[in-house]
Image (spheres, rainbow, N blue to C red):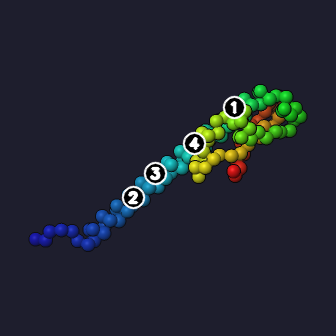
Amino acid sequence: MRKGFTLIELLAVIVLLGVIVTIITSTVLSTVNKSKESLSDTQISTIEKAASKWVTINADKMPSENGKYIDVSVDTLSADGFLDASDLKNPTNGGKLCGYVRVTYINNETYKNQYEYKFHEKNC
């Protein structure tokens, strides 16, 4: 009676382990990417909320014509104390998150005397 495994049995086990590792790796990478997207969305929301507070304090600097806008940089929000920019990191590369929030005045049938906040990322 022979003891041990045949070459085909060993190859089958190795292939099976390779398939399992591939599935686990793709699942982990997917989870990491989703968490980076979620972190990015949270940071953008934080920046836009800081811009909203900035607009409240600096209402005299805001445009009053429909469709006009002003760009408020992350550095301005940080310098004026509305945002702690040291906490903001770009999730994709780990570097500093730079950009600005475009604050647009909207006055139409649907939105009366409101501002729209949209973050735009730029390279540092």
Give the position of the N terminus as an image quadrant. Answer: bottom left
- Residue type marked 3: Val
Mark 1 burial class by Cα count in 10 Å: few <14, some 14-19, many 20+: few
- Amino acid type, residue under disc 4 in the picture: Ser
Amino acid carrying mark 1 in the image: Gly
State left or right for residue 34 relative to residue 78: left
Would residue 33 appear left or right of 50 to someone viewing this image? Answer: left
Q: Going from the N terminus, do you reach mark 3 or mark 1 first?
A: 3
Which comes before the other along the chain, label 4 or label 2? Answer: 2
- Any part of residue 102 in sight: yes
Q: Residues within 10 Å of mark 4 (few under 14, many from 20)?
A: few
The residue where tag 2 is placed is 21
Q: Outermost residue toward the right?
A: 65
Question: Which residue sits at x=78%, y=37%?
Answer: 103
- Where residue 76 appears, x then y in whole percent? 74, 38
Q: Which residue is mark 4?
A: 38
Please name the residue that numbered disc 3 is placed on.
Answer: 28
Residue beneath label 1, please?
81
Give the amino acid at mark 2: Val
Q: Position of residue 61 (x, y in %)?
A: 84, 32
Please tell me whether mark 3 or mark 1 is closer to you in this view.
1
Label 1 with label 2: CB-CB less than 8 Å: no
